[in-house]
């Protein structure tokens, strides 16, 4: 890799560190190519991404970034899982780590906050942005459906009372 390629990689990594809601750092030593392809596929499904980068270049890219405190995790064979959604990458990494014992999560960063192993696990248990939006939309829609039901109920009650009265008059 020549100098220009290294500069390009550092620039790409810098963009990842700046724009990602969460970045998870893990060791992947011993994983097969098929395992890594599986991890990448799961990440794509969750709108996350996986990147293997040289630790030295990643440390250079982290210099001056808000999440620079995660440089301590960049040792050995590391892989970065990242996403704009502050939860997606952590969920993907946690789920993959449960299936593959060779995938060891070290920590990461969420914005300016460094995350240790327990922090990544805690973030992975939080609801995702889409789940929160769906919950809020459900909460906003519930009062409207309750009002519609309350408005419609008296009319149906009146109709049933009138039909009962009509049936009594016909019987008499």
Image (cartoon, rainbow, N blue to C red):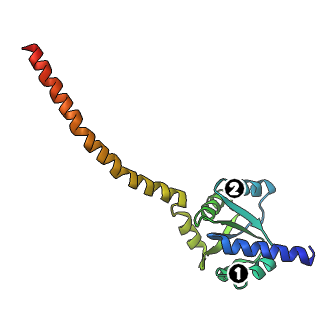
**Residue 121 vs residue 81, the one in the foreground:** 81
Quadrant of the frame with the C terminus: top left
Q: Nearer the viewer, residue 29 or 171?
A: 171
Above-or-below relation of 143 to 127 = above
Which mark is in front, 2 or 1?
2
Q: Position of residue 43 (x, y in %)?
A: 68, 58
Name, please, the residue furthest toward the right.
2
Q: Quadrant of residue 37?
A: bottom right
x and y percentages locating residue 2 in the rendered image:
93, 75
Mark on residue 71?
1
Instruction: Decide if residue 154 is in sight here.
Output: yes
**Residue 102 appears anywhere in the view:** no
Say which quarter of the image contains residue 46: bottom right
Give the number of the disc on residue 44: 2
Percent coordinates x, y for residue 122 in the rendering: 53, 68
Where's the N terminus, which quadrant?
A: bottom right
31 or 86, nearer to the observer: 86
Q: Earlier in the sequence, mark 2 or mark 1?
A: 2
Q: CA distance from mark 2 to mark 1?
A: 25 Å
Q: Is residue 118 left or right of residue 170?
A: right
Crowd class of label 2 (few under 14; some 14 to 19; many from 20; radius 10 Å): some
Q: Residue at x 21, y 38 (%)?
A: 154
């Amino acid at each position: 890799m020549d100098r220009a390629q290294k500069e390009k990689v550092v620039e790409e990594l810098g963009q990842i560190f700046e724009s990602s809601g969460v970045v998870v750092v893990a060791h992947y030593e011993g994983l097969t190519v098929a395992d890594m392809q599986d991890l990448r596929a799961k990440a794509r499904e969750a709108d996350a991404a996986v990147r293997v980068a040289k630790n030295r270049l990643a440390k250079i890219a982290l210099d001056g970034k808000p999440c620079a405190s995660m440089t301590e995790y960049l040792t050995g064979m590391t892989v970065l899982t990242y996403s704009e959604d502050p939860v997606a990458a952590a969920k993907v990494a946690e789920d993959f780590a449960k299936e593959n014992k060779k995938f060891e999560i070290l920590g990461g960063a969420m914005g300016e906050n460094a995350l240790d192993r327990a922090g990544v696990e805690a973030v992975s248990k939080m609801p995702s942005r889409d789940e929160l939006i769906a919950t809020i939309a459900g909460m906003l829609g519930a009062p409207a459906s309750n009002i519609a039901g309350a408005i419609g109920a008296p009319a149906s009650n009146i109709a049933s009372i009138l039909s009962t009265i009509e049936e009594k008059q016909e019987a008499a």
